Image: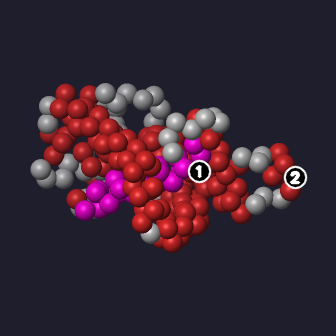
Amino acid sequence: MPLGAVQQLPTALQGLIFISIFAALAVCTYLNVTVVGPALAAAVPAVHAALLAARVPLCSALFFVVGVAHFTAHETIASMYPKPGTWGLWYLPGSASFHTNWTGVAEVAGALGLALGAAGVPTFLHAAFPQLGAVSAAALFLLTIAASPANIYMFTHNAPGPEGAAVPWPLHLLRFFMQVALLTAFWDMGRGVLLGPVPLLP
């Protein structure tokens, strides 16, 4: 199937493909949390430890840069937002520009909170917000889910269209697994906030 061909399919089938991709993202994240992560920790603990140590600086830097890009490359980012009626089920209120702006602010705020929470904020802030890192991770987990339709739209409708070149298949696949990795990391760091004191997953 050529890039963007999903948009040429019947609307009901487009919706099914959208739901299937979202479901695949959820299943892969679950397996990464419950199977792949523990297996990696058992097989190569040094590699697992290195990944754990790198996740905060990498995720913070990534979301800060992407969040800033929502304003420095506003039109390009906005073109990735699904148009009303996409997949026969996308009717979220608000313009593409509005959603580009608030997600940009949220990404920058989440990145800063994650970095400050890991680095150790000043004593008075740490006393007031001891869960800053965990709350930021939980927020970024939810934000990554909220931004997923835009990523799926880029695949199904070959966005951003006139704003840039078509994204090749390997990069779509790479981005999917990057989302899985991000969701896994944010879940691990923020699940205490998301679920409360009793974890439902290891």
Q: Position of residue 14 (x, y in %)?
A: 21, 35
Residue 119 in the image: above or below residue 26: below
Calculate the distance from the C-alpha at mark 2 to the C-alpha at mark 1. Answer: 22 Å
Left/right of residue 155 with respect to residue 150 in the rendered view:
left
What residue is pinned by disc 1? 189
Left/right of residue 3 with respect to residue 118 in the rendered view:
left
- What's the amino acid at mark 2? Phe
Q: Position of residue 7 (x, y in %)?
A: 19, 40
Asked whether residue 184 is drawn in magenta, I would say yes
Q: Which residues are the magenta region?
A: 170-191
Left/right of residue 129 with respect to residue 114 in the rendered view:
right
Residue drawn 24% across the image and 45% down it: 156
* Mark whose residue sits in front, 2 or 1: 1
Q: Which mark is residue 124?
A: 2
Q: Nearer the viewer, residue 189 or 69?
A: 189
Residue drawn 59% across the image and 61% down it: 56
Residue 13, image quadrant: top left
- Secondary structure under tag 1 reads helix
